[in-house]
Image (cartoon, rainbow, N blue to C red):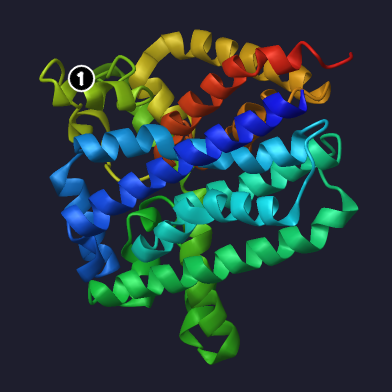
Amino acid sequence: MKRMENRLFWIALFLGMAGNLLRLVDKYLLRGVGSLTGLEAREMLMESGATKLALVGGVLYPFGYLPIFILLGAHVLPRYRWKLALAAFVFLIPALDALVLFSRSFMLVSLAMIYFGISLTLFQGRALPRQLVVPMLVGLGTVLSVSVFAFTWRLDQMSFDVLESVFRSGYAYTIVPNDLMYQFIQNGGALGEIAIGLLPIAQYYVHSIPEFQILWSMADTQVFSAGALHFSPYIKFLSILGLASEPDLFELFPRVGIFTSFWGPLWVDFGWFSLLVMFLFGFLARMVGRGAYHGDVGAYPLYTYLCVILFFMPVVNFAVSAQGMYVINAFVLFWIATRRVARGIPV
C-alpha cells in the first residue's frame, strides 16, 4: 500500500503542477494579463474566452489539491516535512493566483477545503475541533481583510465611492441598509469607517437568497440551459471543436454577475428536474462520506469539496463558481483510481 500511496502522491503532484503551469503561461505570457490591473485583467479574461491551453490547464490543475490529502489521509506513507511543504505550496497556487485578480471565490474555496480536509483526515470529521478554532479564526480574518481591500481597490479602479456603493451596488439592490445604519455611517468616526468597510462584505454574503427569489419570480419566462452551467468544462471543449455554443448568461439570469445561491444555477440548468439532481447529490455525498469515515483516502478530497458546496449553499453554487466542476472532475477521477487502495482498508 505504501508504494501505491507514494505513486498516487507523485502522479497527482505532477499533474497539478503541470496544470497550474499551463494556466499561468496562458494567462500571463500568452494573454498578457500580468501587465494589467486586477479589474482590467478580469475583463480581458472574460472577453477572450477559453483557449485550448487554458482548458487543458483547467482540467489538470485541480490534481494539485490532492497531494496534501494523500499525505494527511495516507495509512502508511510517511509525512515528511518537505513533502508537506511542497504539497501545501501546490495546493495554494490557485489561491495565490487569485490574489492578482482579487477573486474571493478561490480564496474561500481554498480556506474551506483546508478546514474541512484537516477535520476529516486528522480529527475524524468533527465539525469544530478545538485545535482548529484559532487557525480558522486567523484564516477568516485574513480572507475578510483581503476581501475588504479587494472591494475598496475595485471601487477605486472604477472611480466609485464606497459609501455610494453600499446603497447602489448590485448587491444593494436587495440588501439595502436602513435609515438607522445610514445615520450611523453619516456620523463618521472609527465605528462608521468600520461599518463602511464591512457592510459591502455583509451584503456580498447575504444577498443571494433574495436574488434567488427574483429569479424564481420569473419562472414562467425562464430560459433553461440544460446543464450547460454545471457541465461548462464539457461545453467549452465542444465549443472549441465547433460542436456547441456556450450559453448567453443574459438570457438565463435577470441580473448577471450576482449570486443566486446554490439553487439559482441549479434551477436555470435543470428546472423541476433539480429535485432529482439534489437527490443524486445527496446520495453521492452520503456514499462518499461513508468512505471518508472509514479512512478511504480517495474519498477525502471529493467529500471535502462536497462539504464546501454544502456549507456555501446559501451564498453561491461552488459546483459552478470558482471552476468547481473542474475540481469535481479531478476528485471523481481520483476516487475511481484509488479503489484498489480502498479495498485494502480494514472496516
Assign a secondary structure to mark 1. helix
Residue 36, visible in the rendered structure: no
Image quadrant occupied by the C terminus: top right
Tell me: residue 241, above or below residue 81. above
Q: Quadrant of residue 85?
A: bottom right
Tell me: residue 108, above or below residue 300. below
Q: Residues within 10 Å of mark 1 (few under 14, many from 20)?
A: some
Expressed as whole percent of the image width and height from the top left, the position of residue 163 reads 38, 76
Expressed as whole percent of the image width and height from the top left, the position of residue 234 reads 30, 21
Nearest the viewer among 101 and 282 is 101
In this view, the residue farthest toward the bottom is 189
Q: Which residue is mark 1?
A: 238
In this view, the residue farthest toward the front is 3
Image quadrant occupied by the N terminus: top right
Expressed as whole percent of the image width and height from the top left, the position of residue 186 reads 46, 84
Q: Residue at horizontal 41%, vertical 69%?
A: 150
Q: Residue at horizontal 34%, vertical 61%?
A: 101
Q: Residue at horizontal 66%, vertical 62%?
A: 139
Residue 45, visible in the rendered structure: yes
Nearest the viewer among 205 and 128 is 128
Nearest the viewer among 160 and 345 is 345
User: What amino acid is found at the position of numbered circle 1 in the picture?
Assistant: Leu
In this view, the residue farthest toward the left is 242
Q: Is residue 230 left or right of residue 331?
A: left
Nearest the viewer among 343 and 193 is 343
Tell me: residue 103, above or below residue 301. below
Expressed as whole percent of the image width and height from the top left, the position of residue 260 reads 42, 38
Q: Residue at horizontal 56%, vertical 41%?
A: 65
Q: Quadrant of residue 211?
A: top left
